[in-house]
Amino acid sequence: NGDIEVGVHIADVTHFIPQNSALDNEAVSRGTTFYLVDRRFDMLPSLLSSDLCSLHGKVDRLAVSVIWTLTPDLENIKSTWYGRTVIHNVQAMTYEQAHNILHGIAPDHSDAEPPPPLTAGAPVDRNLIPCLKEDLARLTTLTRKLRKRRELVGGAVDLSSGDRGSELKFTLDANGRPVKVSPKKDLEIHHTIAELMILSNAFVAETIFKSFPDSSLLRIHRPANIENFEELEKLMGASGLSFDGRSNKSLAQTLKEVKSKGQGSITDSLFQSLATRAMSEAQYICTGNQEDGVGLSHYGLGIEMYTHFTSPIRRYADIAVHHLLLASTTKVEKNTNIIRAGTKQRATTNLIPESDAMSILKAGNISQVNNAIQDHTDGELDQKLKHIDSNHSKSNSEVDENDLLDSLIEGATELVLNPENSNGEISNNTNIGDVPLGPYRTTELTRICKHINIQNRVAKLSSKECQQLFLSLYFRSHVEVTTAVILGLRQNGLWVYVPKFDLKAPLFLSDRTANLQINPTLLNLPSSSGLPPSSGFSDATGCRMFPDGKCVLHTDDDEAKSMLEVKIPGCKNYLTFKVLDVITIQISCEVSNSSARVPPPRVHLLSLGSGIKHTKSANQSLDMKTKTKTKVVLKSELKSQCAPVELSSTSMFQVLCSIPLSPNLSDIPMRFECTPKQKTAIKGRVQTMKGRLYFGAFKDNPMSETLTNEFNSLSLENRSQMSNYDESRRIEREATSRMQRRAAEKRNNKISKSKRK
């Protein structure tokens, strides 16, 4: 009849992990798989996660499936079926291979190395390419309809940031050190898979909730607090845009207007990143223990009911949902044994059949090993088992893109495909004596939800901190030049956002002693102007220090009128920075041999973007409402204004040593501090002089003029070295005094303790 059948097939993990078994208890304890840059810590044993519960190509695998029957125009869902299946995957492909097939490009590269066993990416059979292209095109058409309807009806919020997302791909060398960092590519095939996952998760959530309204596991997302959008609202106001975040639909409309007005890809990425950061964290909940006044909807997705069903290998919440879904499709026998011992307890039904696979806990079913591996020779099996542990330690960026799909799913919104017969295959909630027949009690499922919420939060923080560590390790030996957008203005620099690495960092224009650190060519000065940069700015290309330079911050209630001025005395040019200006920066990491810690990446100003003005000073106070026109001063004029001082070969120490000093007391009158009171003369004492003798001044020496001339001829660099020496002496004295104080405190503590004893 021309109807289209579309299915989402997920590995049947519950077949191998019975509820309340040792493996199940360990999976609950771990909660989720931890993904780091160079390794991962699986929730399940690698034999399951990498082989038996992974839908590899050209082998049979057990699965739990959701299959829809759609009309030929892909507009409506006629029926839905849930159940256990056996899946034979004709071709296990990577996202890049599927993308190439969809666009008529050869799926494989001639010089590409074959993938390791138990991973996707093997060369695609050329005979299958026409059929694969047809199926992929049909799925793409379906998901495009879904996304378009969400945008028109549900107000879809697209929080994906294209090729400038937070998901980074690290390329590691043989020693595990990062040699390349790049954002993961956001292909249309990623959105196709994400749409189908959203669809299946939403349908499964409705099914399990109808069967077990008091013991279902759902994923909710509370509406974002409007105060969290304060930074986004200010930045959009500075760019002349209005912000409305009262609902997810209004937020989607606001972000859509930003793109339509052509603010630029960098600014679009910034606004999307800030909107994502403002969102609250999604939580797993048990429907029987939900707080009053809190709904079951998902704000980010715009769905009335949502859960996680599609990743039971790496999330225990999906395993629990599989148990609930299979229980909801299983008819309850009349002679079910129910224990009633004062309180309501769960029905003991045999919902999961015994597994024929070898038990790693009981060492049983040894005789069935040959049947379990009948499709493999001994050499092939040994090779596969050998690669399981190696795949276990593979980087998430190399072999797994689940996190990227998660970010796409969290950025999607409301589903609008309404099934014409959604109740046809859904069983009703069946209770016997008011005792729920679900696989979980409410209290038990509530405890599981609280635990996996904590584990998910810890896993995200671990992944984020590991990514930051490897970024620092990368910039330890690499220097990256990229664009950034200014988020805020500070008295000593800027606060910038780097879209390529989804990084927010400070950009300092002066050091701790308020010495300006900037590239003089930005002001049309010679590159040799100023002094060598201080510590912390030595990695910046072309950076020089100007002790007399200043950063002047002009604030205004209107963020668009606030600006930061950078001035150097004697130079007619100055720089002005405003919020949302685009600049070119250099990212590096200054490593100290005296510190074992790897510092975070350091951002330096490299060159000016199109939004920054290069202006000429008018020797007047800055008028916030007047725009100064750009005027470039010629280099010939600048040489006469700000010519660099030639360095002197004579040091200050040599000058001081060459000056002879001799006192001159002949012409100095005596002075007395005070006159003692008149007292009665004492016999036998002779007082020849009263008060205290003072002398001062020196002879006029011809070397004094030499001293003055030599000191004036000293360069700023030598003066800076002297000041650095004085600063080091001051730091040394402060450190010594702190050590003495601590030693005194320790002695006093010991004395007080001995007295108390």
Image: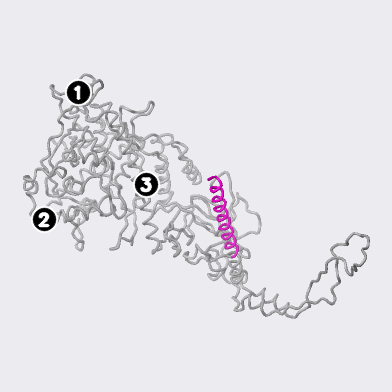
Whether residue 77 is situated above or below residue 123 in the rendered picture: above
Q: Is residue 124 magenta?
A: no
Whichever of callouts 2 and 1 sits on the residue coming sooner in the sequence is 1
Residue at position x 23%, y 41% from top?
A: 312
| Location of mark 1 (residue) | 339
What main secondary structure does the magenta stretch of the protein show? Answer: helix
Whether residue 103 is situated above or below residue 640 in the rendered picture: above
Residue at position x 47%, y 66% from top?
A: 541
Residue 380 tag number:
2
User: Where residue 501 sits: x, y (%)?
Assistant: 39, 54
Q: Quadrant of residue 147?
A: top left
What's under tag 2, amino acid-wise?
Answer: Glu
| Location of mark 3 (residue) | 461
Q: Is residue 744 magenta?
A: yes
Contact between marks 3 and 1 (CB within 8 A): the answer is no
Would residue 757 be visible to someone looking at this image? yes
Magenta stretch bounds: 729-757
Q: Within 10 Å of the Cα at label 3, are there few (<14), some (14-19), or many (20+) other Cα atoms?
A: few
